[in-house]
Image: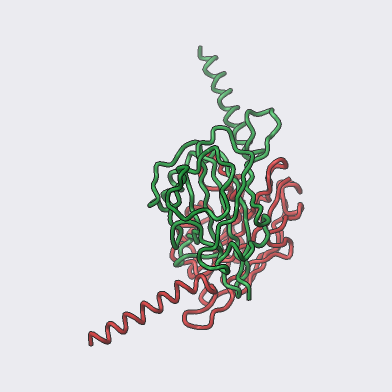
Chain colours: A red, B green
Amino acid sequence: MLKKTIAGGAVILAISFGALLAQDKGKGGGRGGPKGPGLTLTSPDLVDGDVIPDKFTQKAGSSAASPKLEWTNVPMGVVTFALLFHDPDAAPGKKVEDVTHWMMFNIPGDAKGLPAGMSADAKLADGAIQIKNTRGAVGFMGPGAPAPGPYHHYTFELFALDTKLDLTADATRADVMKAMDGHVVAKGVLEGRFHQ
Amino acid sequence: MKKKLIASGSVLLAVTLGAALAQDKGKGGGAPKQPPTPGMALSSPDFQDGGIIPDKFTQAAGPTAPSPKLDWTNVPMGTMSFALIMHDPDNALNKTPDDVLHWMVFNIPGTARGLAGGLPTDAKLPDGTIQAKGIRSVGYMGPGNAAINPYHHYTLELYALDSMLTLGPGATRADVMMAMTGHAIGKAVLVGRFKRPQ
């Protein structure tokens, strides 16, 4: 009996260790199954790591359109997605929280992307909710880094969640991050650079 | 007297507003009306911003691959120390929104304008710099993303601080973030992408 327990413990340990390593080795795979590629976020409107075209930035005005986004390799069991678009190059008010350009959650789990030029409504027809960005407005705020500075690194982070978030459009970025804790089954990132 | 108070209040408001705007218009800028100065910039001679990190700085070269050389310019006035955090936002550790910490360095002297390549993995360096643990160990952990995955976005964030941090090598990432709050007078970012060769 004792032997069996020890053996069982070792199996559990081995599985946990395997799961931990899987994070490094190949994210999207199901437990124990062959490891598939991790959640992949792309846009036909910008090249990953490259410069974001002006039409999606504040150079095109304060209501520039959001780029089209697409994602693939969605793991099993995803109930909703959340999207955060932020600029890590700034530390407003000497604080460590950077600039929130766009945040959205409760995007349906069967969605495979977002169309370009998303509406700036807090509640969308499919149940998705958009919260306020750093400017205090709902929806997408295009990149606006000043000309004399270096490129800023505008980062889209897509969170695949095993739950729907019980939050409203009044939620803050911190509220959303907290609500996602323990529910992030996969992540995908796309990064574009910009300055005026 | 009351008028004077109101007047100085408006000046304060104007200065504060100017400072707030400066963040958007040109981070390093001093008083309003002066032409904006460029924000702090972080670069590496070892890889291009937004480009691919060469294998020699990654786990493809083994677990003790050297850190890339880093350079920074346009340091804001009054910088006492720098902190550097390298992380991989493409992972969600144990279903939390926390990503993978590859490297954390703080109390880099305010006079520094970069870090040498292949930085030693000691917790305390002779110039007072402290390296805390990443998710694996003290010092730099190279990118290790699997070949099957999309590119991960290894993000180096440099904070210019108006203070030293009263923390030791045992500090966690959360400890460092909390200690920096209210002291980050400049910030610069460099991103390199990587996945292992097939």
**Is B134 located above or below residue A99 in the figure?**
below
Total of numbered circles in the picture? 0
Percent position (x, y) of residue B154?
A: 58, 59
Q: Horizontally, is B101 left or right of B191 in the view?
A: left
Percent position (x, y) of residue B42?
A: 62, 47
Q: Would you identify the image quadrant in which residue A3 lies?
A: bottom left
Q: Residue at x 66, y 62 (%)?
A: B52
The one nearer the camera, A143 or A20, is A20
Can residue A132 be seen in this snapshot? no
Percent position (x, y) of residue B66?
A: 55, 59
**Is B37 located above or below residue B50 in the figure?**
above
> For the view shown, which residue lies furthest in the top direction?
B1
Q: Horizontally, is A57 left or right of B87 in the view?
A: right
Q: Residue at x 70, y 63 (%)?
A: A68
Percent position (x, y) of residue A65?
A: 72, 55
Quarter of the image that includes the N terminus of chain A = bottom left
The one nearer the camera, B138 or A60, is B138
**Is A144 located above or below residue A115 in the figure?**
above
**Is A64 located above or below residue B135 in the figure?**
above
The one nearer the camera, A176 or A182, is A182
Quarter of the image that includes the C terminus of chain A = top right
Can residue B60 be seen in this snapshot? yes
Q: Residue at x 55, y 67 (%)?
A: B59
